[in-house]
Amino acid sequence: MRAVDGVSFDVKRGEVFCLVGESGCGKTTTGKALLRLVDATEGDVFFEIPTDEYRRYEELRSRGAPDAAARIDAIRRKYSFSWKEHLAWDTRQILTWLGAVAAAFVLGLGLPAFAAAVVPGALVDTGFIIGASLLCGLLIGVIASLPPTRPSTRTPAGLALLSILAFNLLPIVAGLGWPATLPNAPSDALGISARVWGSATFAMLLGVIFAPAAAGGASKILLGRRRETEGLLGIKMRTLRRRLHLIFQDPYESLNPKQSVFEIVSEPLVVNRIAHDPEEIAALVSRSLEDAGLRPAGEFVLRFPHELSGGQRQRVSIAAALALEPDFIVADEPVSMLDVSIRTEILQLMMDLREKRGLTYLFITHDLSLAWILADRLAVMYLGKIVEQGTAEQVISRPKHPYTQALISVVPSPDPRHLAKRTILKGERPDAVNIPSGCRFHPRCPLAFEKCGWSADEVADELRSLSAGGLLPEIAGIQVQNPGTVAIGIVPGMTPGSAAANLRRVASENRDSRLALKGIADIRENGDAIRVTLQAWEEPVLVELEPGNAVACHLVTPPAESVPTVTA
Amino acid sequence: MHAVSGVSFALDEGEALGLAGESGCGKTTTALALMRLLPYNGRIISGSIVFRGRDLVKASDMRIRKVRWKDISIIFQGAMNSLNPVRNIGQQIAEPIILHEKVEEDAAMDRVGELLELVGINRERRRDFPHEFSGGMRQRVMIAMALACNPKLVIADEPVTALDVMIQAQILELLERLRKELHLSMILISHDLSVMAETCEKVAIMYGGKMMEVGKTVDVFTDPKHPYTQGLVAAFPDIRGQRTMPASIPGDVPSLINPPTGCVFHPRCKFAFDRCIAAEPALAEVTPGRRAACFLYPEVSEVPPRTITMETH
């Protein structure tokens, strides 16, 4: 099930971006996916990406050039924190690496022999050689069995260099470095050399064969465990978490009742190792609390959440978020649980902090009137998709999508003189496991027309209800044949021609009250039955109408005539 | 502890009154007192509730039991939690019908079908259980239940609070339609002034267990007299108005255990003066058809006539 799909937006620095929609439309899921509190299955979240880089990324994605994937990956590696690099090595990398190891091995045998011949006293202590080579092997094994996180720094060539060094450096150093510990200088240089050669070879074979296997096994277990808990980018994410923060909806549930205000606010400081010194921590905590409007801080630090009012609790949440000096805050319905008279103060505080600290907000709310006063730009979501996006004036003063229009029309206004004509949509939002075909909004849309994505089931249901109302006496059975056609049986004794004509008439008479009938493209006799063919459709995509204002609706941007056939 | 005091209002037949205020201001307590449904540790100390010429405060328990649901019914706050999860909705709606109208179960079930259709639910769904309904549908079931015995007065306690705007509009439209069709009187309790602006003729603003202002909705919202009402009206963002941050009322909602002396609103009031701290203002008519409890108006006297008072032990 895709709770959120095809959502794309950008939040500029210092901006308030609102995500608006009814419950279950995927606002919170989107917010959490941004902070990687849930992992998105696809797509990217970029943080602090320069505009031209982002434009390049967009270009690469739309063009689909052969090398696009690699170039997109390069951008992702730099700016995305939702992206996990492909872990497995490909065959070429493995072969190169094996070659590098073989070369290192040969050199590794040659150089010690050379050393033994040239340097008197080198490579005599067999035990030491065995130890040294086992250590080298282990080292290589560990490095080789790590999956590549950053190929740029761990290319096969680099690995080969490392292997050679590791293989050779230690025995040579061993030979040169500790002559005093070695036994008497050999008299028969050649004989000694042969003996040393033999034992050295054996030791290195042992080291190279067994040590990597052991090291590989151990590191696989360790890495596997780590990947399970944090993902490969775990380390990077942890540093980013300081700069991205979340303020939760319910101040009554998001604060731990067993922690004092001091503990709640200082915890992120301690966990992220920002401050160690108790005095420093205390100073940071009281500064955050005072910034969040809890003055004097000393009066609040020792209190527990139950001793605070709702507004004060939400201020504590804000203080805890501020302690890390974040740049970007996802505020998930931060005031929906608060009384109106307190609400404005919290909003004002958030906006003041934006001025003071240059914060950027992603503000998630179901309340359009809040979005109206807060948002620089906003996106309206319906059933996991963005249907309209733009500045507050563009979306709220001049809504273009029928859903946005309806939603705005039903927002109650505190001024009785501002009563507006309300468009109350029928029914409720469909379940996310059963997403309508075409435009997701079409079953509830008062303006839905032919191209909106009527499915055969919807048309068949409407025909059945007409038939049950006695309007179609000639018809015996209605069946969905495939996503594009509905087959209709005829009562024995009736001619298909007149039945089809009647159906055509009834369908065209009722199409304004039963919008699903608009999905019928053609009604034709087919032997003893009638065949109803449906309109072709495609899902509307966000189309930019004016700079920054995009709408996903076929009414606003009519689809091209040559639409591909239905594949539902 | 006095949870609610100095509350007084009148409601004509077929009229809708909005009871507005923030959390803990005594809206629900007032509603429960009207139906004599206060919990065991609460009681009405003084005052009267006159319903069609009869004082409900003095009525016996038997008498009240006949009035409840038959004459006055309530749509409880939180439709999610007010329905019994292990009984189907048909049984739940039929229960008051069987008890009050003394009819057989079959007849009651027919009435349940009618009620469900009245609130826009297919009558076949009466055998479904609450978990099979969405939030908006459950609220409709609650409304059907409140209408079961043809009451004269329906108290709707935050009927749309946890619902989405679109569903909220659907429910409000339904209540509005039912009120017109069935000629009901209604008391709509909500913290959301904008909901009242569109549904109620009269509105009463409560704060800290006291009534601050009562009057016609349009008048109260366009020309609020009490400083609290002024602040509250200004605190609501208006999607059809200016794109400015609404005004705030500094401070917090007062605690009922340790209420401020004098006027409950004085610690947050920008107009407060000596008299507000010393004495409590009573509701008095400040302009024709409008009553407010604020010393800014010379008509307002000091001794509050307590109409409904409750005490909690």
Image: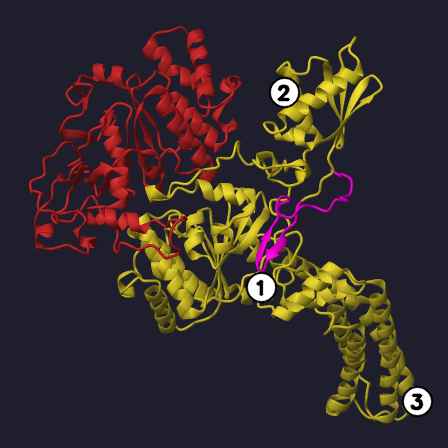
Which chain is yellow in the picture?
Answer: A
Magenta segment range? A540-568
Mark 1, residue position? A237
Q: CA distance from mark 3 to mark 2?
A: 103 Å
Q: Which quarter of the picture shows residue A561?
A: top right
Q: The residue marked by circle 1 belongs to what chain?
A: A
Q: Are marks 3 and 2 in contact (CB under 8 Å)?
A: no
Q: Which quarter of the picture shows residue A479?
A: top right
The residue type indicated by label 2 comes to Ser
Badge 1 or badge 3: first in the primary sequence: 3
The residue at 73%/90% (across/down) is A177
Q: Residue furthest top?
A: B104
The residue carrying pointer 2 sits among few (fewer than 14), some (14 to 19) or many (20 or more) residues within 10 Å by Cα, namely few
The residue at 68%/44% (across/down) is A539
Mark 2, residue position? A465
Residue A498: image x %, image y %?
76, 16
The residue type indicated by label 1 comes to Met
Q: Quadrant of the C terminus of chain A?
A: top right
Q: Quadrant of the N terminus of chain A?
A: top right
Q: Is residue A419 above or below residue A262?
A: above
In this rendering, which labeled residue sits more in front, label 3 or label 2? 2
B218, B188: nearer the viewer: B218
